[in-house]
Amino acid sequence: MSRQPLPRTPKRLDAIDGARPMDEQLLAMIVGLTSEVTILRARLDAAERLLEESGALAPGAIDGYEPDAAAVAAREAVRLATIDKVFRPMREAALADLAATTSAGDAA
Amino acid sequence: MTTQLSEDRTGLAHPLIAVPSHDELAEQLFVRDLKLYVMQQIEPVQGQIAAQEAKALQGSESNSTGALRERMARHESFGSWLALKRESQRQLWHGVARSVERQAEDLEALARIENPKGSVRIDPSFVEPAYIARGDIHLMPGGNAHDDGSLLQGAVMDRGGAVYMLGRNGGMLNDLRGQTTMAHVLTRFPDFNPARILDMGCGIGTSTVPAAQCFPQAEVHGIDVGASMLRYAHARAEHLGAAVHFSQQSAERTDFEDASFDLVFSCVMFHETSQAATMAIIEETRRLLRPGGLAVHLEVPLLHNNSDPWVELSGELEAQFNNEPNWRGALTADYRALFEAAGFKDVNIGYQATSPAARSGPFRFGPESEGVFRSWFVASGVA
């Protein structure tokens, strides 16, 4: 059957005293991401417990895990890529400031 | 903190309630805990700031809620607290709506009841009152009167209500207010034996079912403005074994005959209406009751307290940002005067101790609040 999706945006959202809309949007995104992180952790916890129950994973195996050289390198690459992805806007902003400073210096 | 909104999904109160998946439950528990964090870790700090600001205002001519609000708004944390509080509420509905949509077919199958004991009557020409249409109450998207022809909005309200109340209001049954209302009836008249009962603004029937359980011989009716909620209420009541007749009507003016009920009640309805509607509803209650019949209207226990400007301001903010159309009106009304003007006698105004099951009490009613969730404000009168 064709069913209408339930509405997601409530009617009447008054402006909050002293708050900028962008602040609210950023806050909402952080809450959403925090929610996702707690869901991920709950799911990972469920996976670990189920694997332990089934005998596929020894208790404490994850905490005792020592990655070999290849795994260390792979994990480092993922970590650096994540940092670059998340903090790119701040680097871009700094670079833009630098460019402005440099061109201002050239003009003078 | 509560066993009924926990990770134990086997302890279902009734089969119709939307059951979250592993991830959806984690999402709902996050919202519950975020709301608690805001309430217990951030809000009290705002209260302390307000106490300092109120001190600074003392003696000045601008010693009012408005002046306090203006001073509070100069603190950046005031706005971020309000924004986080509102966002937690929006996340609640967002997550619950997605969970309900996922299991829509199962819920609709469960709602197909053969040989129901009760009934549901929808009015296609019904127009929602202005105070319902103006803003979605509790920020539930679509609002109480949302109708897409299904019962899904009712399912959202049921599951969302349990999360919203943090499980403190009777867990998944969310029925403490209905039980407490019936306990008030029995406190006043231990042998009360109504033949016909009406629950006004019944929503998904969380308070209607306790009435039917407390008085199994009675013919029980429930009215509300929302078609989706009423369809859900009907199926929910059937699953709980309660015979209830639901119909889509405004409590301000119903199509029931004069003097046709022995007990007319409502639970936390007035603060979702308007001052004019409150008066009309009390008059309608009087019209519907036979001589000697009882009216009981239950409200939130945080009655107006002029002495604390922060209580005043936080109530005002809750009303504005969580869309409670008549918060101030309901909390400041002179219910004794309204009841007496409508022709009620033996009017009782006070606080009824919260009852988990009406017939086992406690049958305690007095002029002082026992605290939020431990007692409820009640106004009652005899027709």
Image (cartoon, rainbow, N blue to C red):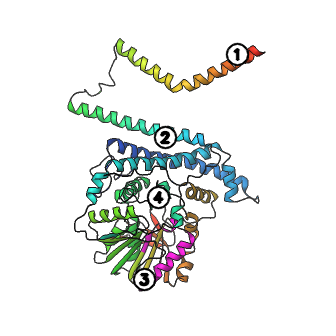
Residue under label 3: B289
Q: Which residue is mark 1?
A: A102
Q: Is residue B369 found left or right of A69 in the rendered image?
A: right
Q: Secondary structure at mark 1?
A: helix
In the rendering, at what x and y percent does residue B61 appear? 76, 60
Percent x, y for residue B162?
39, 55
Residue of label 2: A31
Assess whether residue B283 is covered by the magenta stretch.
yes
Q: Earlier in the sequence, mark 4 or mark 3?
A: 4
Q: Chain of mark 3?
A: B
Front one among B39 and A23: A23
* Separation (CA) of disc 3 from disc 2: 49 Å
- The local crowd at label 4, few if under 14, some if 14 to 19, many if 20 or more residues have their Cα within 10 Å, is many
Cα–Cα span, label 1 and label 2: 39 Å
Kind of element beneath mark 4: loop
Foreground residue among B251 and B326: B251
Q: Quadrant of residue B304?
A: bottom right
Name the residue rendered at 59%, 40% in the picture. A23
How far separated are the C-alphas under marks 4 and 3?
Answer: 30 Å
User: In the picture shown, does residue B348 fall above or below A75?
Assistant: below
Q: Label for residue B143?
A: 4
- Element type at marker 3? strand
Q: Looking at this view, is A28 or B48 the one in front?
A: A28
**Where are the magenta residues, as a range?**
B265-292
Q: How many marks?
A: 4
- What's the chain of the residue with tag 4? B
Q: Are marks 4 and 3 on the same chain?
A: yes
Name the residue type under label 2.
Val
Question: What residue is drawn where x is 39% and y is 19%?
Answer: A75
| Residue B261 position in % (x across, y down) | 38, 81
Rounded to the nearest whole Å, what is the CA distance between mark 1 and mark 4? 56 Å
Check disc 1 and give the amino acid type: Thr
